[in-house]
């Protein structure tokens, strides 16, 4: 099996080495830019040549990585640039690129985020309910604050303010992330009724859950084109994932809700 230029031969579970940082990076086949693999989306090909998203980056065989937004991918699909890039990445293997590939990728990223939120919920790291979120946010126990795309501005503003208080960030203008998922999609993902806001528990000594969620959030938010600003610790350091604390959201992803 041949490996395309943007794939690495070194196993992801190999022992750390001086080149570990380089091994964790991939090159976007469309922009040519190199980024950490957890910020990119992997594409794989099925046995019949169909190009499909591999949000978990676990599918066997060849893969190609993209780090562009949905709008940029749609343009590359329309003008043939995507096909040419994929042909190079997969060494001329027969390919079938679905016309709805951008929608499939966004739906796959939404499912991946939903799966992550479900895991964190079972681990006790997800806080729901506006009153409970506000109370824990004010006491500094909420590391990540997320809002459904159809949440009200008043509801977001109240929780955002409590979150800033708990993070000693009053006056900073920091806001929670408005996801490109509505309350229906979030409710399906978490198996709860009417999930409009949610927090990820964390504190300066333990940001592991926050980092895991932010990784999934950032890829979805970036691909959907809603990445506005960078998420940071309360001391100004970037949180892994660069999740946007955007003030606007897109509509729900129909494919995700149906699955």
Image (cartoon, helix red, strand yellow):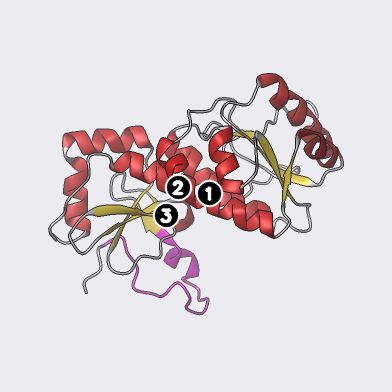
Is label 1 in contact with label 2 (beta carbons under 8 Å)? yes
At 46% from the left and 71% from the top, the residue drawn is 19
Whole-angstrom CA distance, mark 1 to mark 3, is: 10 Å
Circle 1 packing at 10 Å, graded few (<14), some (14-19), many (20+), is: many
What's the CA distance linking mark 1 and mark 2? 6 Å
Sequence-earlier tag: 1 or 3: 3
Q: Inspect this view and state whether residue 242 appears.
A: no
State whether residue 47 is above or below residue 252: below
Tell me where residue 15 appears, x and y as whole percent. Answer: 51, 79
Say which residue label 1 marks.
Answer: 113
Q: Indicate which disc residue 252 carries.
A: none
Q: Is residue 179 left or right of residue 160?
A: left
Left or right of 135 in this view: 24: left
Q: Can you identify the residue that label 3 sits on?
A: 55
- Spot the residue most to the top: 154
Badge 3 element: loop
Answer few, some or many: residues within 10 Å of disc 3's Cα (few below 14, many 20 plus, some between 14 and 19). Answer: many
């Amino acid at each position: 099996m041949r490996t395309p230029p943007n794939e690495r031969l070194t196993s992801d579970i190999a022992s750390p080495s001086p080149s570990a940082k380089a091994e964790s990076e991939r090159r976007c086949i469309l922009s040519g830019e190199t980024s950490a693999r957890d910020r990119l989306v992997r594409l794989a090909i099925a046995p019949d040549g169909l190009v499909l998203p591999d949000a978990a980056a676990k599918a066997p065989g060849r893969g190609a990585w993209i780090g562009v937004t949905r709008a940029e991918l749609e343009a590359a699909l329309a003008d043939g640039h995507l096909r040419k890039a994929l042909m190079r990445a997969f060494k001329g293997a027969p390919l079938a690129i679905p016309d709805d590939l951008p929608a499939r990728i966004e739906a796959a990223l939404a499912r991946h985020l939903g799966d992550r939120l479900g895991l964190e919920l079972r681990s006790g790291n997800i806080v729901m309910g506006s009153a409970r979120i506000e109370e824990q946010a004010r006491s500094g126990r909420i590391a990540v604050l997320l809002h459904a795309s159809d949440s009200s501005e008043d509801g977001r503003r109240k929780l955002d303010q409590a979150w800033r208080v708990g993070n000693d960030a009053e006056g900073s203008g920091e806001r929670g992330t408005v996801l490109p998922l509505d309350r229906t999609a979030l409710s399906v993902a978490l198996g709860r009724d009417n999930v409009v806001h949610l927090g990820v528990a964390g504190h300066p000594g333990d940001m592991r859950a926050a980092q895991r969620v932010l990784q999934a959030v950032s890829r979805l938010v970036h691909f959907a084109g809603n990445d506005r600003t960078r998420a940071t610790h309360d001391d100004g350091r970037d949180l892994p994932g660069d999740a946007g604390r955007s003030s606007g959201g897109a509509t729900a992803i129909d494919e995700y809700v149906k699955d």
